[in-house]
Amino acid sequence: MIEAENLRKSFRSRRGEIRAVDGVSFRALDGQITGLLGPNGAGKTTTLRMLYTLMRPDEGRVLVDGIDAAHRPADVRSRLGVLPDARGIYKRLTARENVEYFGRLQGLAPALIAERTARLVAALDMDDFIDRRAEGFSQGQRTKTAIARALVHDPRNVLLDEPANGLDVMTTRSLRQFLQGLKAQGRCVLFSSHIMPEVAQLCDRIVVIAHGHVVANGTPDEIRALTGMASLEDAFVKVIGSEEGLFG
Amino acid sequence: MSVWWTVFRKELRDAFRDRRMVIVAFVVMPLAVPLILAGMSALGARKQVEKLEATLDLPVIGAEHAPNLAAWLASHNLRIVAPPADADTAVRKQESAVVLRIDESFGADWRAGQPARVELIFDSSRPIQSGTTINRVRNLLEAYDRQVGALRLVARGVHPAVSSPLQISARDVATPESRFDLAKQLLPYLMLLLAFIGGMQVAIDSTAGERERHSLEPLLTTPASREAIISGKILATAAFTLLSLVATLFAYRLAFALMPSEHVDLSLDLPLPALARLLVVILPIVMLGATLLTALAAFARSHREAQGYLPLLIFLPMIPTLFLMVAPVKTQPWMLAVPFLGQNQLILRILRAEPVSAAEWAISLGSAFLLAGIAWLVAARLYHREELAASS
């Protein structure tokens, strides 16, 4: 379970202070897929970065399985599987070596890493490129490698930043099935997206973020009821206040 | 398995798969360094011999005023040639190393027993190119001067020793190993430079490169501590540098074994024990270099920015070498504590086959490792900055 309590984060820039995240609270439960939806620049990536301890919140608190990220960041990280915005796999290593490296950094024994890798290769359909060097991988192959790398330690909680970015239709479909599988195993899945249909199809709960605030939070039905709109798409436009960046 | 070891192994594997990096470290360097040093040494030795023993063409202005002197010089392996139109310009342009001008009144003065005037025209700002030649001509003139002077005294019934109150004899205590040689001055610098920045590509690739390729953020989502990550990267850089250095030193030895011995200064050879001692002297510089480079590259946003700092780092090991060339002072204990200066001194002493005491080893190694430790703290601190991974 991932809990965000009143998170705030500002950045200094030449034009003054920018409030990227301004009081974001929500809860992502085990056995559910939670979607973080918002236009570009709404603060999704910054929120996720605070959840996986890359950034310290100026205010507020992050709890993962009840553990406070500010006090035990390493324990929190070992309970999270993270697909960051930047996929960045090592080009001179094979996909398998990329996964192995992260397995070792998570402190796993080689035999266990091999076993987990085999399972992930089957689940993500990586057979034809697992032993190839990552130089020249397609966007889909890179994303799959990055997901396998993020899940090698079998984490209870899975965070994905815009997982479907740059993927073709077929790969998006298999990714969707993969996330459903993670949910069925009882994991807490949290992903961000700016693409509304993707979120609508997959999520049990939706947290809508705009301008650093949570503007709506609930099941798809609740959000429809809240706005009085029949379609989710209209509901989103209403809560965000504009259509800007939502369908990019 | 500990985290730093995992990072260390991954970074080395990554580095050895980069063909460009491997070629520079294990082909270009091992070829270039021995070629530069051995070539310089061979060239220097040949030039020296040529300048001392080959027939020297000496332009003489007014040779007709002193036929005896000209004949005497010609009998001492000099060939008198026609002077250039403008002697000063010719010397300045290095067309001649030295021009001798004999005064018009030479004959008259000579017969009158007055000092007869000869003039040497040379350029003292080029000691390396023409110093030997100038000395050779000057020595010949002085020899002629003494010889004729002695004959004149004898002719007047005076013992020639009267005019030589001093008998100066010189004894050079330089061992073959300690003779001045440009190649030998250059060897410590090249080794220190290689030790210091030889791992540059690995350091930049594993930090600034990792940022640029966006693989740092995923790396920092693992429970691995940043200290352990940066330690693994630093040690990988150091190991790569050390391997490249060892390859270069062995190539250097091989070059000396293959070169015909009359062409090289054998005192530049490195027997195995000396080679081992050299590596120990250089080891802390390797660590210091790897740590500073990693810290610098962690600070830089991109490959290109990191490479911008390079000229500064090349200059750093040069300072003590320049200092020693300008002011070749006796080794003081405090100098051994100064990085580069201390190593430079120790390398020269090892090449000269001079002993190094345990205390001197301790000062040199201790101070350099201490500095490397401080640099490590800085690097680790830089790696904790929030902007590091989240630059996009």
Image (cartoon, coloured by chain):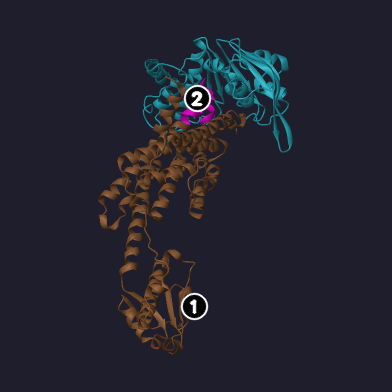
Chain colours: A cyan, B brown
Q: Amino acid at mark 1?
A: Asp
Mark 1 Cα shell of 10 Å, populated few (<14), some (14-19), many (≥20): some
Relative vertical location of residue B73 with respect to residue B112 in this rendering, above or below: above
Magenta segment: B215-233
Provide the residue designation for mark 1. B88
Majority SS type along the magenta span: helix
Based on the picture, tell me whether residue A54 belongs to the magenta stretch. no
Does dot 2 land on a helix, a strand or a loop? helix
Spatial separation of the CA atoms under disc 1 and disc 2: 67 Å
Seen in the image, is B125 located left or right of residue A132? right
Tags 1 and 2 on a common chain: yes
**Left or right: where does residue B387 sit relative to residue B105?**
right
Give the quarter of the image for residue A94: top left
Chain ID for label 2?
B
Quarter placement of the N terminus of chain A: top right
Residue A124: give x, y in percent of width and height: 43, 21
Residue under the point 70% across and 14% down: A225
In the rendered image, residue A18, in percent from the top left (x then y), is placed at 72, 31
Instruction: Classify the position of the C terminus of chain A by image quarter.
Output: top right
Q: Is residue B275 visible?
A: yes
> First in sequence: mark 1 or mark 2?
1
Residue that label 2 marks: B228
- Spot occupied by residue A242 in the image (x, y as percentages of width and height): 72, 28
Depth check, front residue: A193 or B185? B185
Is B15 drawn above or below residue A53 in the view shown? below
Residue B229 among those drawn in magenta: yes
Q: Chain of mark 1?
A: B
Image position of B293 with respect to B180: above or below: above
